[in-house]
Amino acid sequence: MSGPESRMDPRSYYDVMALDYERERHAGYHLHLDQAEVASVLEYVRGREVLEVGCGTGLILARLASVASRAVGVDLSPGMLAKARERGLDVAEADATSLPFADASFDTVVSFKVLPHVPDIRAALVEMARVVRPGGIVAAEFYNRNSLRTLVKRIKDPSPIGGGVHDTDVFTRYDSLSEARSYLPPDCTVEAVRGVRVAIPVAAMMRIPLLGPVIAWQDRLLGRTPLARLAGFLVVVARKRG
């Protein structure tokens, strides 16, 4: 399923969003997403040289940097990058389909919340694989077409994201797991599939006192079981052949 054509170019969309992107990102549902996404790749990041494609304001990159030997981020949006630099992070402005790094520069390349908004997904994944060393990891997150989250997205009104923009103001793609696999370049083999938002039918549940942390714990556990295929977000972990 393809989303609507963008009414804004991606750089402008994210620059506007950057104005108050983090207003609700430090608690509840959004905090859980960031923590779960990091947990999904932690074993491939610890002690390694890592690149995050689409690092935004650096919320995830900062967590990766705390355990990696080196962590670098790129993003299309100068507005987002300004906030990442305020965190002291190593970041650069770049498009996901044209990464400014030499071949085989990193052990692991990850991307969260971004690739579903890149129309030329295959080109982005080719670039991510290019800058990974042989035997290294590409971990790419997709919006799962076969999930309750996607069903809700189909029937609800547009949601405000930040800075006055809505989730329908930018190109968005939803993929099945088989489609996500098919986008990977031929030198990458799927090693694992992690799920984020398996046990959270409604994001507002995460605001319920005492219940929110229990749901988050359960969601992280289920994300490493076969039920991950039903998650709102699919993290496909692929290894580049040596």
Image (tube, rainbow, N blue to C red):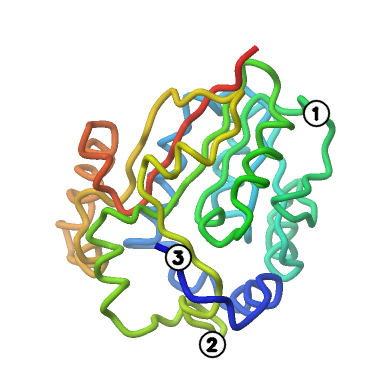
Q: Which residue extends farthest left?
A: 211
Q: At x 41% / y 46%, what residue is drawn?
A: 35
Residue 223 falls in image quadrant: top left
Residue 123 x/y as whole percent: 67, 46
Give amino acid for label 3.
Ser
- Of 226 and 80, nearer the camera is 226
For the residues marked 1 and 3, what is the alpha-carbon distance in whole angstroms? 31 Å
Q: Position of residue 149 (x, y in %)?
A: 28, 62
Quickly name the residue at label 1: 103
Identify the disc placed on residue 164. Answer: 2
Q: Where residue 216 appears, x then y in whole percent?
A: 25, 49
- Classify mark 3: helix, strand or loop: loop
Identity of the residue drawn at 33% across and 47% down: 196
Q: Is residue 30 left or right of residue 79?
A: left
How far apart are the two marked residues, 1 and 2, measured between alpha carbons? 39 Å
Type of amino acid at the residue the image marks with label 2: Gly
Tell me which numbered mark, 1 or 3, is placed earlier along the sequence: 3
Image quarter where the N terminus lies is bottom left
Compared to residue 213, the image places residue 67 above or below, namely: above
**Residue 46 location, quadrant:** top right
Q: Which residue is mark 3?
A: 2
Q: Residue at x 72, y 71 (%)?
A: 79
Q: Sequence order check: which comes first, mark 3 or mark 2?
A: 3
The answer to which quarter of the image holds residue 51 is top right
Mark 1 closeness class: few <14, some 14–19, many ≥20 residues within 10 Å: some
